[in-house]
Image (tube, grey):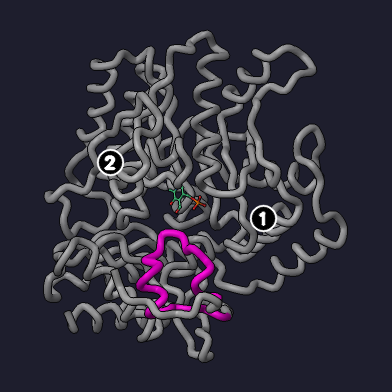
Amino acid sequence: MSAVTRASNDPLVHQWMPFTANRQFLEQPRLIARAEGVYYYNTRGEKLLDGSSGLYCIPLGHGRREIREAVAKQMEELDYAPPFQYGVPTAFRLAAEVAQLTPSGLNRVFFACSGSEAVDTALKMALQYHRARGEGSRQRFIGRERGYHGVNFGGWSVGGMVANRKSFGLGLPGVAHLRHTHIPENRFQMGEGAHGAELADDLERFVNLHGADTIAACIVEPVAGSTGILVPPKGYLKRLREICDRHGILLIFDEVITGFGRTGEPFAAQTFGVTPDIMTMAKALTNGSIPMAAVAVKDEIQQTILDAAPADTVEFYHGYTYSAHPAACAAGLATLKIYREEGTFERVKQLAPDFLDQIAGFKGLPDVVDTRGFGLLGAVELAPKGKPGERGFKILCRAFERGLVMRAAGDSLVLAPPFAATPEQISEMIDIIRELIREG
Ligand SMILES: Cc1ncc(COP(=O)(O)O)c(C=O)c1O
């Protein structure tokens, strides 16, 4: 335990920070006071590059005036309306616009407030869909090792991050996990790895073990983000799709990080040419400005659930006080307008090749054991020094002193630059990381 000697009335002691080494933070606070474009400013007014687009949520950079003004205008007109049994026009417009971006067939959109909520919503939709079709025995979920699907009970149960699970007991019953796809054969391969498509066959093994008629859905991130950018092996996602189709299992893509352009197309589903049945999204939906998430489902899934309920009754007993909050809808509409008008996702295609080359260029530096990436997601993995993750965390802390905000997933250093970054700014991020790796 570190020796923290802050006064009990110091404001820093009162906030219990999420996913943070709270005691270390009290000794070495990393405070961010302001942001503009691709820069943060600390409390001394010094600039820091945003190397992780906030938490993968600010592709346009910080402080876009159009979003701010749209939210302010909405708040003046309508600050809140109950989303149960009432609706606000902006929510319907936003749902229609999201449906324009999702793969064809996924046109029904349910709003939530965070990625975690979107995931739990998606899991519940899958359960109710099967029940509505008379296949209520389908109650198991299949997740994947090293997957991250948020922190609510459904999400962490299907997730495969050990630290997020081990303190919280049993979680949802009936969950099994596919093996992860981070295999040694694909080390230092940027883009999709050549090996490992057959790992998808784990799903077939669960079918053999438990019976397809007990499995509701399989949920994966197309590219696993939070465990350090694990790109799917070539053909892996297609194979999962085929197995799901063969056995009536719904395929859920969690696109909370990959959604809205990160892989160069609106969604990774389009990039990899595989259409899920249900898709979760959040983060970049509002450019991170107001909490909001969504679940897009195939029309047939929603229709089945609606048709199974008696007339004039609630069909899906689920929703949040802040589902489709007017301010979030306004932020979402303003954000999608910018994406459309500025061709934001195209910019990823322009920036990604050079970005990924620079990530690949870390190979050969001391203790670098892997480089990987796709689109504007890149990771360099270092051999552990001390406890696993200790080295990555130390570099994250030192990067802050050098003017870079980044992510560390264990001992993998992760960059996810805003799409608004210039090639020079991206190179600057890379240079800081290179220096920190060289220093050991
Ligand atoms: C793939 C994925 N799903 C779900 C979540 C949870 O989102 P939130 O933190 O908004 O609850 C995240 C967060 O990073 C994520 O990356």
Specify whether 112 is left or right of 186: right
The residue depicted at 28 percent of the width and 26 percent of the height is: 203
**Amino acid under label 1?**
Gly
Position of 41 relative to 85 (above/below): below
- Quadrant of image for the N terminus: bottom left
Which of 249/338 is in front? Answer: 249
**SS for dot 2:** loop
Q: Which residues are magenta?
A: 11-33
User: Magenta stretch: residue 242 in it?
Assistant: no
Q: Quadrant of residue 372?
A: bottom left
- Quadrant of image for the C terminus: bottom left
Q: Earlier in the sequence, mark 2 or mark 1?
A: 2
Specify whether 217 is left or right of 366: right
Kindly report the distance in space between the C-alpha atoms of the residues bearing marks 2 and 1: 32 Å
**Amino acid under label 2?**
Glu
Query: Of all residues shown, which one is farthest toward the right?
Result: 77
Mark 1 Cα shell of 10 Å, populated few (<14), some (14-19), many (≥20): many
Position of 35 relative to 173 (above/below): below
Residue on which the image places disc 2: 145
